[in-house]
Image: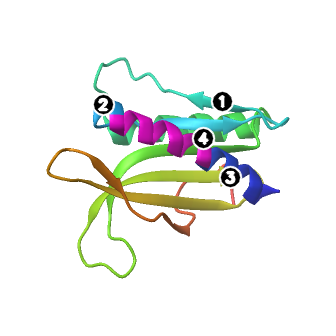
């Protein structure tokens, strides 16, 4: 069940991130959460500035989700950010949508969607790939 929850959150985050890239060329890190009954909500943080620091925004969202999980108000969450990554079997880093996902069961995963822009500014999305967890967890080990 955890994987199904994380897949649903990933799909929600990816659609919004792709929309923001196409419409605005960038996006501020945002989150998605799943309530105990399975309802998905998009979440934005507020650091009090128009152009918040991405690292600070990711930390705020992850911390907020961990607190919500401790209170039992969510069962899974994800933080979506724009980053750089070296895709498998490649040597060069590229831009990528990264969705960090965590479930109260302890399951975590990071899903990357590399992307580039062609000479006309059109976004080209590459094949997604996943990596084990990372530092985003909803429960203490």
Q: Quarter of the image holding residue 56?
A: top left
Name the side, left or right, on which 120 lies relative to 130: left
Stretch in magenta: 11-22
Q: Secondary structure at mark 3?
A: helix
Q: How far is the residue under mark 3 from the one under mark 2?
A: 26 Å
In the picture of the structure, the residue carrying the numbered disc 3 is 6
When the figure is inspected, residue 95 is found, relative to residue 79, above or below; the finding is below
The alpha-carbon separation of the residues under discs 2 and 1 comes to 22 Å
> Residue placed at 30% from the left, 78% from the top?
90
Would you place residue 88 above or below residue 77 in this image? Answer: below
> N-terminal of the two: label 3 or label 2?
3
- Asked which quadrant contains residue 69, the reply is top right
Question: What is the distance, in whole Å, between disc 4 and disc 3 at their CAs?
Answer: 10 Å
SS state under label 4: helix
Q: Is tag 4's residue or tag 2's residue first in the polypeptide sequence?
A: 4
Q: Which residue is mark 2?
A: 24
Q: Secondary structure beneath disc 2?
A: helix
Whether label 3 touches label 2, CB < 8 Å: no
- Observer-side mark, 2 or 1, equals 2
Q: Which quadrant does the C terminus fall into? A: bottom right
Query: x, y (%) of residue 101?
Result: 60, 52
Q: Is residue 27 magenta?
A: no
Quadrant placement of the N terminus: bottom right
- Answer with mark 1 or mark 3, whichever residue precedes in sequence: 3
Disc on res. 12 = 4
Q: Residue at x 67, y 53 (%)?
A: 7
Q: Of the residues under marks 1 and 4, which one precedes in the sequence?
A: 4
Place of residue 55 in the rendered image (x, y in percent of width and height, measured from the top left): 36, 42
């Amino acid at each position: 069940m955890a994987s199904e929850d994380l897949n649903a959150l990933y799909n929600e985050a990816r659609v919004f991130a792709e929309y923001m890239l196409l419409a605005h060329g960038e996006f501020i890190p945002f989150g998605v959460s799943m309530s105990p009954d399975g309802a998905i909500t998009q979440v934005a943080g507020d650091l009090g500035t128009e152009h918040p620091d991405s690292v600070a925004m990711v930390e705020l969202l992850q911390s907020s989700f961990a607190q919500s999980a401790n209170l039992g108000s969510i069962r899974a969450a994800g933080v979506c950010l724009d980053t750089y990554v070296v895709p498998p079997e490649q040597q060069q880093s590229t831009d990528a949508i990264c969705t960090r996902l965590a479930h109260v069961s302890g399951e975590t995963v990071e899903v990357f969607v590399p992307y580039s822009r062609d000479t006309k500014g059109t976004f080209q999305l590459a094949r997604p790939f996943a990596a084990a967890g990372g530092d985003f967890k909803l429960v203490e080990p």
